[in-house]
Image (cartoon, grey):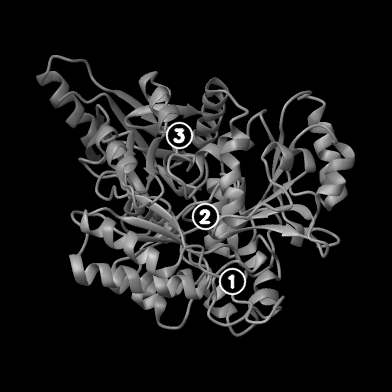
Amino acid sequence: MRIDHVIYSSKLFTGEGDDAAARAVAIAGDAIAYVGSRDDAVAFAKEHNDAGGYEAARVTDYGDALIVPGFHDSHVHFFHSAVYSSPLATNFLGENEADCVERMKRFAEGRPTGWLLAQGWREYRWNPPVLPSKRSLDEAFPTRPVALYSGDAHTLWLNSCALAELGITRDSVAPAGGSYDRDEDGELTGIVREAAAMELMPRIMNAFSDDEIADAYRGFLRTLARNGITSVCDMSLMANPGLDFIRDDVHARLLENGELTCRVNLFPTLLDDMSRFESMNRQYRGPVLRCAGFKQFFDGVSSQHTAWVTEPYSNARCDDDCGRATIEPEKMRKLVMKAAEHGHPVRIHTIGDAAIHEALNIFEAARERFGSLPGRQHNCLEHLENFLPGDIERLAQLGVVAAVQPPHMTLDPGGPERDLGPERVPLMWPFKTMQEDGATLAFGTDSPVVDVNSMGVLYSAITRQDPQTREPRGGWLPEQRISRADAIRAYTAGSAVAAQRAGEVGELHPGMLADLAVVDTDLLACDAEDILDAKVVATWMGGTCVYEA
């Protein structure tokens, strides 16, 4: 064994306990060989290197910067994150419908031909808070297709040219779990929701070449490295075979070229036909690129009343306005049972309390029939915005991981109270209660729903405030705040559990892969407001420094 590097700081957090201490990490190849004092680590390196006839390892002293395990975003839509943060598209919230159209006009100046794409609009954050329509886009772009993807990644806003290009007419029937909005005269408004929107996205994205997509991926990888993120879970966003935006071919191309500077764990769509997953699972089993499990959708989002809830929304738009399951529960049960029979973990998008409850029922039935998943594998629920009493405790009892995104709490100020009412709000994003009941938290962003920002994730969990506005003062449901160390653990070791990689990454111990983030601020002790100003100094993935400020 040759020790290649010794990395030292007066503040190193292994993942255990609540404090950092003066420690060094000795790295051999892509793994950690030793953790201890600086002198002992250097002596360990000298002993092993002398025995092998090598010179002493390179020692990097990061002074009093904080060294932590590499951050792990447990829920990323890699394709969309890459495209919408690249020159291929643009990204904005907008102040209202007219402002969005003006922004698209400016973007079109730099892309004179082809589709015009944007992401990020949220009509409930506008003034006035009303849905847009194709009319404003038609006036500005009568001959070019335009598609604006909503900030929550569940709705498309299209112009007439885009609808025509996609073959959507007044008589078109939306796929199950989706809809084409129409006005009182039955005319298409240009708003396409849920499964219908997701079905159209691959056809829109076909406008880009594989080389353009690969360049976008490279750009997004640089963003991840700047944020100290050494591992992500690339989650499917579609329900059709081969159209879930898991571009394993692009990841594999970058890996072959030595350009994949982040571990990527793939979660393609769970379907009756499992052949695509099985092929990927055989092909991608290395330490950097791995096919880890399945993903499915059970409901939509609360802001659009498409999340599946038990009682009607407080501001109901129709009788029995409870949203709905995007997949019939019995079909979801059959899919999960089939995966469980083969020993494969499943991650299910569940936002409403009815979706969470039924998903837990299905996981419980699968465990009773087939036993626990093999090894260190776990089923997961994604997002989990509001619970029924008793279901928080069931998460831990069933060993189901809670993959949550702290910045989601404050995306829609006042929205939870508006949509679900004061009685249900106390059971929303209950991080502290989940933790106290023994559930594993796995943090992420759901990028591009929320921009990748590792300090923003930690700040939101620790303060229950928005990383952009720093509101509300004192925090939203502040009794659900968690500690600094627990937040870091959820963003490292917890996310490793969701990725089915516990024991490999997420902590700094001998035998684990050498993934580290070095931050210029002591996140465990600094003022909470200083977290957002903290900067990543260096990012190491597999014993290689992939980013240096």
The residue sitting at the front extreme is: 171
Q: In terms of secondary structure, where does tag 3 sit?
A: loop
Relative to 432, 115 lies left or right:
right
Callout 2 touching callout 1 (CB < 8 Å): no
Q: Which is more N-terminal, label 1 or label 3?
A: 3
The CA span between labels 3 and 1 is 31 Å
The disc at residue 412 is none
The CA span between labels 2 and 1 is 31 Å
Q: Which residue is the site of mark 2?
A: 458
- Given the image, on which type of amino acid does mark 3 rest? Arg
Quadrant (top left, top right, bottom left, bottom right) of the N terminus: top left
Neighbor class of circle 2 (other Cα within 10 Å; few <14, some 14-19, many 20+) is many
The CA span between labels 2 and 3 is 29 Å
- Residue 321: quarter of image: bottom right
Q: Residue at x 40, y 27 (%)?
A: 545
Q: In terms of secondary structure, where does tag 1 sit?
A: loop
Counting from the top left corner in percent of width and height, residue 453 is at 57, 45
Comparing labels 3 and 1, the label whose residue is closer to the camera: 1
- Residue 148: quarter of image: top right
Observer-nearest of 324 and 216: 324
Q: Which is more N-terminal, label 1 or label 2?
A: 1
Q: Which residue is the site of mark 3?
A: 247
Q: Which residue is the site of mark 1?
A: 323
Counting from the top left corner in percent of width and height, residue 51 is at 9, 20
- Residue 230: quarter of image: top left
- Given the image, on which type of amino acid does mark 2 rest? Leu
